[in-house]
Image (cartoon, grey):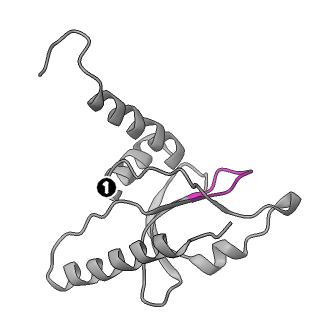
Amino acid sequence: MTLIPHDLGFALRANGLASRVHAARDEIFDPWPVVKLFNPIGAATWLASEIDADGDTLFGLADLGFGCPELGCFSRAEIAAVRLPFGLAIERDEYFDPLAPLSMWTETARRLGSIQLAEKALLRRTIDQLLPDPKGEGS
């Protein structure tokens, strides 16, 4: 499996460019995550929203499984080079749905202690917004 295929790489580069433009204008930029990478036999998870012009430095939310997800930069090459037991490697979640802007992911993951728990909470929130109110209230 390609860790970051061409179409997702394009979206990451576009967000990286948009981030630089917004920063030059002193504007806030809050993109949605583009790709989710994870350790298939551990708790480490990364949500990347952009990539730097160097083609390696990703920006997003990193959760190494210690209960304190952090925004920051991480290396695509280093993540791709990780070799796990049984011949496994870091994988991309092919079915990842971004669900919310990166700021909401960050706030939720920090509050709950992990990206995995944040994903469940954001999915529940999304489903609740789509379903009609069973009591017919709040419309």
Please tell me which residue lies in front, 8 or 125. Answer: 8
**Neighbour tally class for label 1: few under 14, some 14-19, many 20 plus, Cα within 10 Å:** some
| 95 is higher (above) or lower (below) than 3 | above
Q: Is residue 90 left or right of residue 7?
A: right
Question: Residue 38 at x, y = what percent?
Answer: 62, 57
Say which quarter of the image contains residue 106. bottom left
Q: Residue placed at 33% from the left, 74% from the top?
A: 15
Question: Residue 63 at x, y = what percent?
Answer: 54, 57
Q: Residue placed at 57% from the left, 55% from the top?
A: 94
| Residue range (magenta) | 37-45
Q: Which kind of residue does numbered mark 1 sit on? A: Pro
Which residue is farthest bottom?
54
Q: Is residue 35 left or right of residue 23?
A: right
| 48 is higher (above) or lower (below) than 25 | above
Q: Residue placed at 31% from the left, 28% from the top?
A: 128
Please tell me which residue lies in front, 89 or 25. Answer: 89
Question: Residue 21 at x, y = what percent?
Answer: 22, 83
